[in-house]
Amino acid sequence: MMKCLCALLSLFCCVTCGAPAKTQKDVRRVPVVMYHSVCKTNVGEFVISPDGLRRDFKYFRDKGYTAVFVRDIVAFCDGKKNLPEKPIVITFDDGFYNNAYYALGIAEEFGMKITVSVVGSYVKKEEKEKKRSPVYSYLNYDDMRRMQQSGWVEFCNHTYDMHRTSPRKGVRRAKGESASEYEKTLTADSEKCRKLIKSACGVSPDVFTYPFGCYSNETGKILAKLGYRAVMTCKGGINVFSKGSAAGLDCIMRYNRPGKADTKAFFAKIGV
């Protein structure tokens, strides 16, 4: 009789209590900031000045944030790594030369890791350019290699040649395109950029960044099939990741940082 009672009590506890509740150490609130070009001229929606970027990085440091790579987030979600108490991800899209010319030095100055998503065709074209400028040039192989070797940069796939608005916008499925044709096109383009990054840096990326934040219903499944562990969007919002759970990795939200916005006012508004 006593054995039966103990068994019932044990079963009751399992049903009512379930798995242990997540602790503060198991959950992280992660803001992701999206930059593009860093330049002294043409400051605007997608261009921030070097001094503006320096003010931002100082703000992050003063607020107690630690910059991490997207791959650090993936490792945390896999249960293989812990994250600092206040992580932040700092991203740069398109692979502008000024990311190496200005941003890398500022990142090193403030001890901030940065994540750069490159468009493969831009890198390939830049290899032929003899005259280069932080105003209009893109990264080449040597720039990427130097940034990778610094330890402060990770590179992500921003497509090889799909950073366009026509015949499709970004990696969105084109009108009249069959599912099989779409998968074949996206796969070929993605793999081409992945091989380029591997050739330049020795590391094969498993993080993909949607150009313009555009995609279709099938896109995520195709990228997952190709081995991508995380995907970054252009949707604004603060991410919440749990240790041991992949939830949220397939749709990482980011805030675009307009170059003319005041540092304190902008980040206070989005809760950073």
Image (spheres, helix red, strand yellow):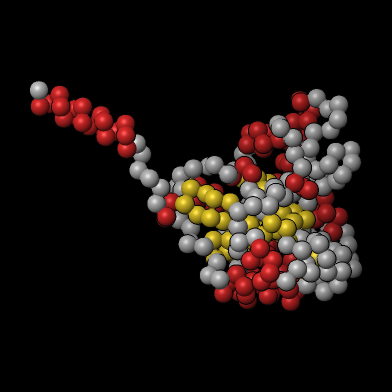
Residue 105, x across and y down, in percent: 68, 73
| Residue drawn where x is 64% and y is 52% of the image | 237
Q: Looking at the image, which is closer to me, 13 or 168?
A: 13
- The mark total stands at 0
| Residue drawn where x is 46% and y is 48% of the image | 243
- In this rendering, position of residue 67 left or right of residue 48: left
Quarter of the rendering containing residue 95: bottom right
The quadrant of the image that shows the C terminus is bottom right
| Residue drawn where x is 69% and y is 56% of the image | 255
Residue 110, x across and y down, in percent: 61, 74
Residue placed furthest toward the left: 1
Could you tell me if residue 204 is visible in this image?
no
Q: Looking at the image, which is closer to me, 187 or 203?
A: 187
The quadrant of the image that shows the N terminus is top left
Q: Looking at the image, which is closer to me, 118 or 46?
A: 46
Residue 61, x across and y down, in percent: 57, 72
Quarter of the rendering containing residue 7: top left
Is 180 drawn above or below residue 261 in the view shown?
above
Residue 197, x across and y down, in percent: 70, 52
Is 240 drawn above or below residue 144 in the view shown?
above
Could you tell me if residue 259 is visible in this image?
yes
| Residue drawn where x is 68% and y is 33% of the image | 222
